[in-house]
Each structure stands twice: as C-alpha cells, then as structure tokens.
C-alpha cells in the first residue's frame, strides 16, 4: 500500500494511506476504513486526524482490494491475523467495544503463543 512505502522513505511513523483529502491533509487510517462499525472505536471524521476513517467505508484502494480478496475466498478463511509493529500489543476483536467474544480465552491462548513464537524468531 502507498502508506507503507511512504513510511519507509519519508516518515517512519506514518500510519495512513496517501490519498489526498484536502490541501493540507493526506490519507485515511486503513484500520478504520472497514464497513463493520465504521466511524466507531476512536475513528475520526477529520481528514487531518491520524485516525481519520475516510469519507466512506472501503474508500481506500488497499482496504477495498483486501476486502474483495477476502470475500472472493468465502468460507475458506479460518483465521485472519493483522500484525502492527507500533506498541507491540496483542489486540483482540473488537476495538469498538469492551465486551469479550465468546471465544475470548481461546483467542488469548493463541495470541500469547504467537507472541512467544514471534519473539523466538525475531527477538
């Protein structure tokens, strides 16, 4: 995605896409650009905000493309993991609520084992 390349050449902490939304403000936060609970969980409607959700769900080419790919696979996907390097935290669905999923404990076990395995591999 365009924001990834920019984060490696210009601003290492850049988290948004590179779509211009005004003269001064660029990009939307792809983590908040999905249709489910759009504009919830800390999302902003201010294009200059780091958490700008975009003008509409899937407005960013990267989220639209990934959504189309996931939908094309139907029920073939058994799990989806999204890695984020900032803060090094284990985050479980969903970000818009403090309610736990029915399989919260199972997700915690899987996530904690992933942390152990990733630390062994990458330090």
Image: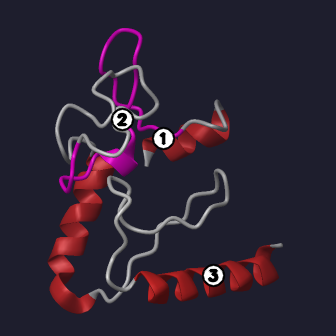
Check disc 3 and report the residue beneath it: 112
Residues under numbered marks 2 and 3 in contact, where contact means CB atoms less than 8 Å apart = no
Instruction: Report x, y in % for residue 58.
Output: 21, 48
Check disc 1 and report the residue beneath it: 3
Looking at the image, tell me whether mark 1 or mark 3 is earlier in sequence order: 1
Residue at 41%, 10% in the rendered image: 24
Marks 2 and 1, how far apart in space?
Answer: 9 Å
Check disc 2 and report the residue beneath it: 28
Q: Is residue 110 left or right of residue 88?
A: left
Looking at the image, tell me whether mark 2 or mark 1 is earlier in sequence order: 1
Residue at 39%, 77% in the rendered image: 80
Task: Specify start and end residues of the magenta stretch as a single range.
Answer: 15-38
Residue at 67%, 78% in the rendered image: 115
Looking at the image, is mark 2 or mark 1 nearer the viewer? 2
Looking at this view, name the residue that lies furthest to the right.
Answer: 123
Q: Main secondary structure of the magenta part?
A: loop
Where disc 3 sits, the SS reads helix
Where disc 1 sits, the SS reads helix
Looking at the image, is mark 1 or mark 3 nearer the viewer? 3
Judge by depth and name the residue closer to the eye, 62 or 101.
101
Looking at this view, name the residue that lies furthest to the front.
Answer: 99
């Amino acid at each position: 995605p365009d924001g990834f390349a920019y984060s490696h050449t210009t601003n290492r902490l850049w988290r948004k896409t590179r779509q211009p939304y005004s003269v001064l403000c660029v990009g939307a936060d792809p983590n908040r650009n999905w249709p489910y609970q759009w504009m919830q969980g800390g999302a902003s409607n201010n294009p200059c905000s780091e958490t700008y959700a975009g003008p509409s769900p899937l407005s960013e080419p990267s989220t639209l493309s990934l959504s189309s790919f996931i939908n094309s696979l139907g029920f073939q996907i058994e799990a989806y993991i999204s890695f984020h390097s900032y803060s090094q935290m284990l985050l479980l669905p969903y970000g818009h609520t403090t309610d736990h999923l029915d399989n919260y404990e199972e997700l915690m076990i899987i996530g904690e084992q992933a942390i152990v395995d990733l630390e062994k591999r990458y330090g």
